[in-house]
Amino acid sequence: NHAECPQMAVLGDNLIFLPFQVLIIAHVTAGMVNLTRHEKEKYFLTATGEKELFPSLHDPHSRELSVVIPAYNEELRMPVMLDEAMEYLENRQKQHPSFTYEVIVVDDGSKDKTTEVAMRYSRKYGAEKFRVLTLVRNRGKGGAVRMGTMSSRGRVILMADADGATKFADIDKVEAGINDLNPKPENMAISCGSRAHLEQESVAQRSMFRTFLMYGFHFLVWFFCVRGIKDTQCGFKLFTREAALKTFSSLHVERWAFDVELLYIAQCFKIPIAEVAVNWTEIEGSKLVPFWSWLQMGRDLVFIRLRYFTGAWSLQSSNKTD
């Protein structure tokens, strides 16, 4: 037993230093905000095939609504979602001719025909309504949403998933959520679609292990980053232009946990956030590989908090960059 004591002491010492080691790793491995774009990513193609420069989020708005759709290898699932979205937007414009919109599909370095599929819609509806931003390399969903948002013209900006899991007409609900937020400091507000009301139903259908992972993730979000939002991960969020500029200018995380950092930034800036129940259906072909993705997201959540805590990351002013 005495022989084991030194080993236990060493183990105890290691455990004491573990938080400091994690803190140092988080600080040293922190990447910076990456707002630069490749020369090819500065342009979109018009219906006639000419290159035109994307506008900037720093410019005044010239459309009522921008819809930003990140897409990675979505040639098969995306058309259903785009048909539904365009039908809704076109009908709304017929009923209210003053309503203007644009859709921006951001192809996140896909290996399939995502860009070609999206360009069919651009040719059908014209580049004033439908634009395609093709990224030179895969950045991750957060990076794709940010690139599309920084290229948008809307007074309000909706991010929506390409799989169509959320019914597009539920934009009415998130718009009502944003309109009900008062006051809006410097016109900043965010409205999040939420699946929290479906949680009991989903628990009944999930394995015990996945349910455990889900609750573990919720706890980490609550403990480290965001309080008061039950569902941070639903890919259906509406931002005022001012809120989008403020939050996306500071976003570091470009992969799955980016939603959490966005909302963390918003809460740091005291931007009001509404959470609104939306219709949601699980779509076949999800790219989130459960176990490893949960681990990666869990690590990202811990690191988000630690990196702001150590000063490795800081909240940016929304100054214009390339």
Image: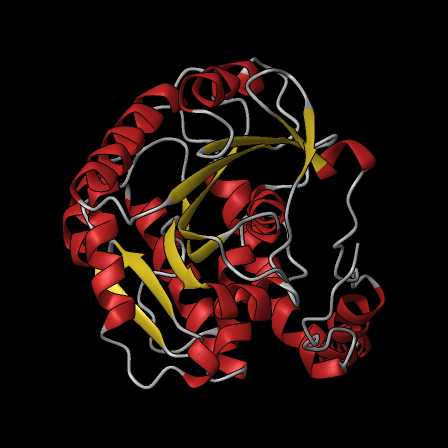
Q: Nearer the viewer, residue 263 or 136?
A: 136
Number of marks in the rendered image: 0
Look at the image and tell me whether residue 283 can be seen. no
Residue sitting at x 38%, y 58%:
238
Residue 38 found in image quarter? top right
Q: Is residue 136 left or right of residue 46?
A: right
Up the image or down, 52 lies above or below 245; here it is above
Q: Which residue lies furthest to the right in this view?
A: 28
Front in this rendered view, residue 173 or 33 = 173
Q: Is residue 29 above or below residue 23?
A: above
What residue appears at the point 47 percent right and 15 percent down from the top-left corner?
A: 120
Q: In which quarter of the image is the C terminus?
A: bottom right
Q: In this view, does 265 lie to the left or right of 207?
A: right
Residue 27 in which image quadrant: bottom right
State whether residue 229 is above or below residue 74: below
Q: Where is residue 314 in the image (x, y as percent from the top left)?
A: 72, 77
Q: Where is residue 320 in the image (x, y as percent from the top left)?
A: 74, 64
Q: Which residue lies furthest to the front in this view?
A: 97
Model colouring:
secondary structure
Q: Which residue is found at the position 54% from the left and 49% from the top?
A: 152
Quadrant in which the N terminus is drawn:
bottom right
Q: Position of residue 303 (x, y in %)?
A: 66, 67
Residue at 20% across, 36% down? 94
Q: Is 90 or 147 nearer to us in this picture?
A: 90
Does residue 122 show up? yes
State the image coordinates of residue 150 (x, y, percent, origin top left).
61, 53
Q: Is residue 228 above or below residue 176?
A: below
- Position of 278 compared to 49: left or right? left
Where on the picture, by quarter, is residue 248? bottom right
